[in-house]
Image: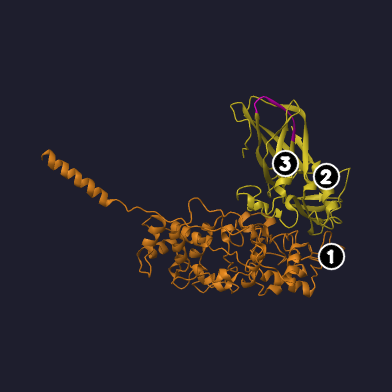
Amino acid sequence: MALSSCFKNKDAATINLNFNLEWFGESTAIGDTVMYQENLPLRLEKFLFYIDDISIRDENGNWLNSGSIDMVEFMPNNETTSAEFSATTVRRGVEIDAIKFGLGVGEFYNGLEDAPTHFGNDHALGSVQSAGMYWNWYTGYIFTKFEGKIAETVDGPILTPFSFHTGTDDLYREVVIELENSIVVAAEESHDFNVVIDLGNSIYTNEDQIDLFDNCVTHTLNNPELAERYVNLLDDAWTIVE
Amino acid sequence: MNRVNAFIIVSLLLVGGCECREPQWEATPYDLEIPTFFPPMDIPADNPLTVEGVNLGRHLFWETALSLDHSISCGSCHAPDANFSDPEQYSEGVTGLLGDRNASAIINLGWSTTFSWDGASASLEDHIRVPVEHPKEMNISWEEVENRLQYDDFSVDYPQMFWDAFGENIITQDLAVKAIAQFIRTMISSDSKFDKYRRGEAVLNEQEAMGYQLFLREGGDPEVTPGGEFGADCFHCHGEAGLQFSDYLFHNNGLDASFENDPGRVNITGWALDSGLFKTPTLRNVALSAPFMHDGRFQTLEEVVEHYNSGGVPSSTIDTFMKYTTGGLQLAPVQKEALIAFLHTLTDTTYINNPDFQDPF
């Protein structure tokens, strides 16, 4: 999907973000069973998120914003990539040293009354595209969803559900990924970045560890502490493979 | 031939040519009123609503010539009194065979993004094609339907109606399907007590308001279920957003432990995660839509509420929203009654009695 920008000229180039799903460093897909804690089977069932205002930082430290918003959903059996779209259109020759995007829906749109009715059905925020991602009496848009089930024993059935649904303006996060080496988008018309989201790191790092048996459900307002812990981990779970 | 005669002949040919031209066709755009708070309706660019198309669609919806033995029409299994669904668990087709699933309600389908219980059809038009040829339903080829509508005697002039609707003399499956889809898109309900409440024209009584709050709250005892709010937990799938009370997605709501009888959505996607998943039905006019669930296993709203209250049956694909399979929602009787009272506020009798949707024959 090509998004509009101010740089529609013959020197324009396009940035694409390809998202890859991982579980503690290993490629995985929705529907896969991975290992949790002491080798307890965990099945990944759903991961989707709103991606807001994808931006790039140029060599002068200026952020070039796309102003875009879209929903990215990993579908079953897509092992590594489920989303690919143009992030922004930039001047050919611009040197990029960081990428930034919002996880969620910005305050303005999230605060609209009956927000989905303000958008066409083909818009990411419209009623059709946001099905299951908007609770108008509750938190507005759901920014991210991560769901799955765990077995309680190594050989047990995978039945114990967990679901993290985050929303509210307070939990809107900006993911900033610094590039190890800046990229000059020069000779080509587009450049692809492979962005990895490690769902293992969204629940367990050295900084914080979420026990999915004790903390299995948050829809944000009903368990804001858990939602914030999860979102903070998720914020740091993105990397770029260069 | 002199020049004058030649001029006259040419002039006559021109006049004759005018007389032989196809009559001009122009259908009347249908003014579809989108109710307050409703999102826009997606209408296919190749099937805009017209007065003539909707009228034709209504006649075809009720036309028994669309079944092999002229015994049933679409309306036979989508009866107005039952919210344009079938009050029987399974519908009986022309051969006497019963269908495999309950015939769902036709209400506000113009906003639905998925069709049939397993999402087999990608569009309303595609969905309409299915029952005509289905051996357990109308069991007739579309080719035969086309022939009947084109050549048989009816109380209405179908060839003329197709011409009026589409400017086509030849009746085809595609045009018939388009007309029925146009008619169904006009079948809009927006005058329930809840709609009036949303518009500030009515007030929910104490019991209904209590039920509404239960509808909107997380289920479970927070001491047992993290995040529980002692609610009924309906809103996840039957979301109010868009005012259709359905996310139009597919869920396993804990009806069965295994799915040999009807695997549901997995038959369409092939994804194991979709085993036992079925479309979330709208709750509009739910009090008129019995029986409930894809297989019509529940006859009353009380049974439905009790199913969720008990927590349902665990399985490998049960939805994470059904997280109370041990212990259930534990709603008190007064809460269950309140929830059902709220569901009754979604009843819109003006919809089922709308004369524009009734049998025109």
Element type at marker 1?
loop
Element type at marker 3?
strand
Element type at marker 2?
helix
Shown in yellow, the chain is A
Q: Which residue is at a point 48% across and 56% down the rendered structure image? A: B49
Instruction: Check the image and name the residue furthest to the front.
Output: B201
| Residue ID for mark 1 | B221
> In the figure, A98 relative to A140: above or below?
above
Colour of the chain lettered B? orange
Residue nearest the viewer, comparing B329 with A23: B329
Q: Does the segment drawn in magenta span residue A4?
A: no
- Answer with the quarter of the image where residue B91 lies: bottom right
- Answer with the quarter of the image where residue A188 lies: top right
Magenta highlight: main SS: strand
Instruction: Check the image and name the residue furthest to the left.
Output: B1
Magenta residues (range): A91-99
Position of B46 with respect to B5 (left or right) is: right
Residue nearest the viewer, comparing A13 with B200: B200
- How many angstroms separate mark 3 from mark 2 (CA)? 17 Å
Residue B324: x %, y % from top left: 79, 64
Three-letter amino acid code at the position of disc 2: Leu
- How many angstroms separate mark 3 from mark 1 (CA)? 37 Å
| Residue ID for mark 2 | A233
| Residue ID for mark 3 | A20
Three-letter amino acid code at the position of disc 3: Asn
Three-letter amino acid code at the position of disc 1: Asp
